[in-house]
Image (spheres, helix red, strand yellow):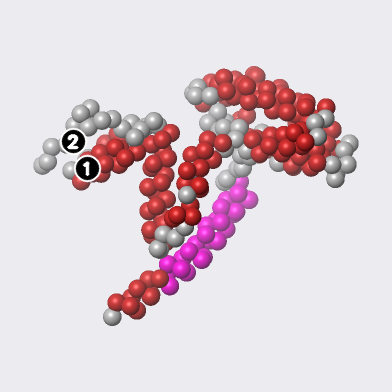
Amino acid sequence: MHRPLRRERYERARRICRHAPGRRLQGLQSDYKGGAIREAACLAHLRRKIFDVHDSQPTELSTTAMAGIQAIYRIEEEIRGLPSAERLAARRSRTRPPVRALRRQLMRQGKGLSRHADIAKAFAYGAKRWRAFNRFLYDGQLEPDNVIAERAIRGFTVGRRNWLFSGNFAAAERSAVVLSIIETCKLCGVDAEAYLADVTERIQNDWPASRWDELMPRNWARREEMPLPLAA
C-alpha cells in the first residue's frame, strides 16, 4: 500500500523539477523584458577576457584597458563598506571619469580592429553589454562585480557532487534555505553552527514574532546577551 504512494510522490517531484525551473525562468524573462528587472553585469568578467588576451599577447590597447579597469577597482577598494549614499557620491565624482574613458576605448578603438582579433572580441563583449557594466555607477548598493557572491558559493560548488540529489523538490528547497543561512552567517562573521543551534532553541521556546528581526545573523547575539522569553 505504501509503494504506490511513494511512486506518486516521486512522479510529482520529478514533474515539478522538470517544469518549475522553466516556468520561473519564463517569469524572470518577462520581468526583464518589461523593465522590472535590470541587469547589472560583472566587471570582473570583462577584466578576465581582456587580461587573457593581455597575458598572451600584450599590446598598447590591452595595457591601456587593463590600467583603466585597475583604476576603477582601486577606487572601489577605498569606498568598500561605506554607506551606499557615500559610495554613490564617490562613484559620481571619482569613478565615472575612468569608466567613461574605458567606454570610449571599447567603442572607438574596437571598431578599428579586425573582428577576428582576440582583443577585438574582448572589446566587443564589453561594448555590447556596456549598459549593464555601467549599472553600479547609479546605485550605491551594487558592486561592480559578483566576486563576493562567487566566493560565497565556492564551498558549495566544490562539493556539489556530494549532494547532487536531494531526494525530492521540497528537500532541495530546504537545502537551499540552510545553505543560504550558513553563507549569510559567514558574511556577518557569525559561527553558523552556534547560530543555528541557538536560534532553533529560541524558536522552540516561543520567541515572540515581533522580535524576529533580532534573530537575523546580522543582529544575532549570544544567549547571555539575548535572554530567552519566559514561558507563559
Q: Which residue is drawn at 48% across and 52% down?
A: 160
Q: Using the rendered image of the protein, determine whether residue 65 is visible from the camera's viewpoint.
A: yes
Q: Which of 84 and 41 is in front in this view?
A: 41
Q: Which mark is residue 228?
A: 2
The residue where tag 1 is placed is 201
- The residue carrying pointer 1 sits among few (fewer than 14), some (14 to 19) or many (20 or more) residues within 10 Å by Cα, namely few
Secondary structure beneath dot 1 equals helix
Q: Using the rendered image of the protein, determine whether residue 107 is visible from the camera's viewpoint.
A: no
Secondary structure beneath dot 2 equals loop
Q: Which of 40 and 8 is in front in this view?
A: 8
Quadrant in the rendering for residue 190:
top left
Which amino acid type corresponds to the residue marked 2 in the rendered image? Leu
Instruction: Name the spot of residue 146 as percent of width and height, x first.
Output: 57, 37
Q: Which of 213 and 149 is in front in this view?
A: 149
Q: In this view, does 166 lie above or below 132?
A: below
Magenta-colored span: 11-35
Q: Residue at x 54, y 40 (%)?
A: 150
Task: Specify whether 149 is left or right of 2.
Answer: right
Image marks 2 and 1: residues in contact by CB distance under 8 Å: yes
Instruction: Name the spot of residue 230 as percent of width and height, x first.
Output: 13, 37
Give the mark nearest the N terminus, 2 or 1: 1
Q: Residue 71 carries which label?
A: none
Residue 12 highlighted magenta (yes or no): yes
Q: Is residue 59 above or below residue 12?
A: above
Task: Specify whether 203 is left or right of 189.
Answer: left
Q: Which residue is drawn at 74% across and 42% down?
A: 125
